[in-house]
Image: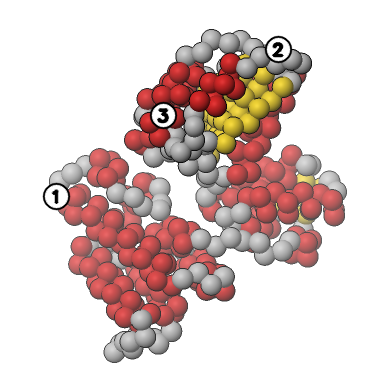
Amino acid sequence: MQLRSEQLEQHLRGGRLATCYVISSDEPLLSLEAQDAIRAAARSQGFVEREVLHVDARTDWSILEQAASSLSLFSQRRLLEIRLPSGKPGRKGSESLQTHARRKDEDALTIVTLPRLDRVTRNSDWASALQSVGVWIDIANITRDRLPEWIGIRLARQRQSASRASLDFLADRVEGNLLAAHQEISKLHLLYGDGELSLAQIQAAVLDVARYEGNSLTSAMLAGDKLRITRLIAGLRAEGEPLPLLLWMVSEELRNLLRLQQAVAGGRPFAAAVRTVRLSAAPALIERLLPKLSAKRLGELLARCSELDRLVKGLSLADGDDDPWLELTELAFGVSLG
């Protein structure tokens, strides 16, 4: 069975727990909160003893069988946690997880934690086996456009509220770093207690703890958000992010857009074509953007990437700025110009 993360609390209140829970997430905070909720429900039903296994493709997977078969001296009900940070158990691990899924033990509860999986891995035998006997919770990333709402919900939980402008300000300061966001939100309650928060209060209390990442830049580029592009590039530059890596990410995004544009122009349905490329924005946004970008325009932008690559390597441009970071900013702006 598959559950959305917001359905987990109601499921756990339902009484009878599943024998296996799989938490698939790239957000450490949200994964940890889901694990804590399951552990609390398990403890309330007598699952006292707990064992944690850290595994990957190189692990001797016999430890899983040993852990599952061991009898407790102190408690009949056991909680087994399998942490698979790579999301790739390998052949032996796949076989062991499938065998574990077939075990019938009402006194054992398993929690598997792993990152969000690609389509092939998600449909693998071991993943299907775990979902068939338990609950699979796929937790989506909190994107920038959803972050103010997410912060507002968290504030409401601690009986606080803030205006949209205040939520946007806070979102800008914690973008890409939910753990830091959680800390800042908790701090606001310690400082000000219940009630509505003013923008001035939030500005006085909150540090700039954004974690700038290259994929945030490409998603902002596709969204045409020039203010965010400017802020992200300034943050990436300040953090010492390698410019060649960022340029490669932008170039790959443009190449994938070109592949998609050519496929659609060739008669392939957008819904089918978009699944063949890897892009940093939602399909709905890409579908709105694509008609504005001709193959010629995308080719010009890729040519500009080549010129910027020369500038990064110390060669000057005949028509352009000598600052490669400014050139990268203008290049990212160029996608929204269509």
Residue 272 visible to the viewer: yes
Residue 325 locus on image (x, y percent) = 45, 78
Q: Position of residue 86 (x, y in %)?
A: 48, 42
Q: Is residue 239 left or right of residue 336?
A: right
Label 2, secondary structure: give it: loop
Label 1 sits on what residue type? Answer: Gly
The amino acid pointed to by label 3 is Lys
Packing grade of label 3 (10 A; few <14, some 14-19, many >=20) is: some
Q: Nearer the viewer, mark 3 or mark 1?
A: 3
Query: Disc 2 residue type?
Result: Gln
Q: Nearer the viewer, residue 40 or 254?
A: 40
- Circle 3/circle 1 CB separation < 8 Å: no
Q: Please state, as top left, top right, bottom left or bottom right, where the C terminus lies in the image.
A: bottom left
Q: Position of residue 31 (x, y in %)?
A: 60, 38
Residue that numbered label 1 is attached to? 266
Instruction: Give the residue at mark 2.
Output: 76
Q: Is residue 184 above or below residue 64?
A: below
Query: Which class describes the residues within 10 Å of circle 2: few (<14), some (14-19), or many (20+)?
Result: some
Q: CA distance from mark 3 to mark 1?
A: 43 Å
Residue at which label 3 appears: 92
**Quadrant hosting residue 177:** bottom right
Q: Residue at x 30, y 43 (%)?
A: 275
The structure residue drawn at horizontal position 63% and vertical position 57%, both measured from the top left corner, is 174
Q: How is the image coloured?
A: secondary structure
